[in-house]
Image (cartoon, rainbow, N blue to C red):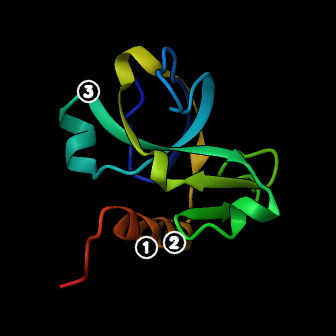
Amino acid sequence: MTTLKRGMVIDVDLNPVKSSETGKIRTCVIVTNDIYNARVPVIQVSPVTAWSEKKSRIITNVSLSPTAKNGLSKKSVVDCLQTRPIDHRQRLVRVRGTLSDDEMANIDHALRIVFNLHDL
């Protein structure tokens, strides 16, 4: 079994969903810390969606360009507002790659806005 780490780009099956939740098999970024990732089966992920100018202007979205390291095939956006828990034992489809430290810093900033967390 693959050891899941914060910042990994993974494909997960988000079905079933309710209402306006993000669904289907979707690329996501793991945002929980590695202590939880190693010890519990439920992790937090933020879904990745297709890039658009409109989506890129939303303060809680983070734009990503495809690289060999992250495994993305097109310009994308991480939707930090749609962060959700998943049981990776049931929902993990595959690992695509890993984000850079700078990309994760941008995601951290967006998550602080979503959850109203302030630096101490």
| Residue 90 appears in the figure | yes
* Cα–Cα gap, marks 3 and 2: 25 Å
Which of the image's four quarters has the N terminus? top left
At 38% from the left and 38% from the top, the residue drawn is: 84
Residue 70, image x and y in percent? Answer: 65, 51
Q: Is mark 2 on a helix, strand or loop?
A: helix
Q: Is 119 left or right of 27, judged from the image as shown?
A: left
Check residue 33 in the rendering and tell me which mark sits there, or answer none. none
* Residue linked to disc 2: 106
* Cα–Cα gap, marks 3 and 1: 25 Å
Instruction: Residue type at mark 2: give it.
Output: Asn
Which of the image's four quarters has the C terminus? bottom left
First in sequence: mark 3 or mark 2?
3
Q: Is 82 left or right of 71, judged from the image as shown?
A: left
Residue 98 lies, with reference to residue 13, above or below; the image says below
Residue 94, image x and y in percent? Answer: 57, 26
Residue 58 lies, with reference to residue 86, above or below; the image says below
Q: What element carries label 3?
A: loop
First in sequence: mark 3 or mark 1?
3
* Residue linked to disc 1: 109
Instruction: Give 114 or 49, whichever is nearer the viewer.
Output: 114
* Residue linked to disc 3: 41
* Cα–Cα gap, marks 2 and 1: 5 Å
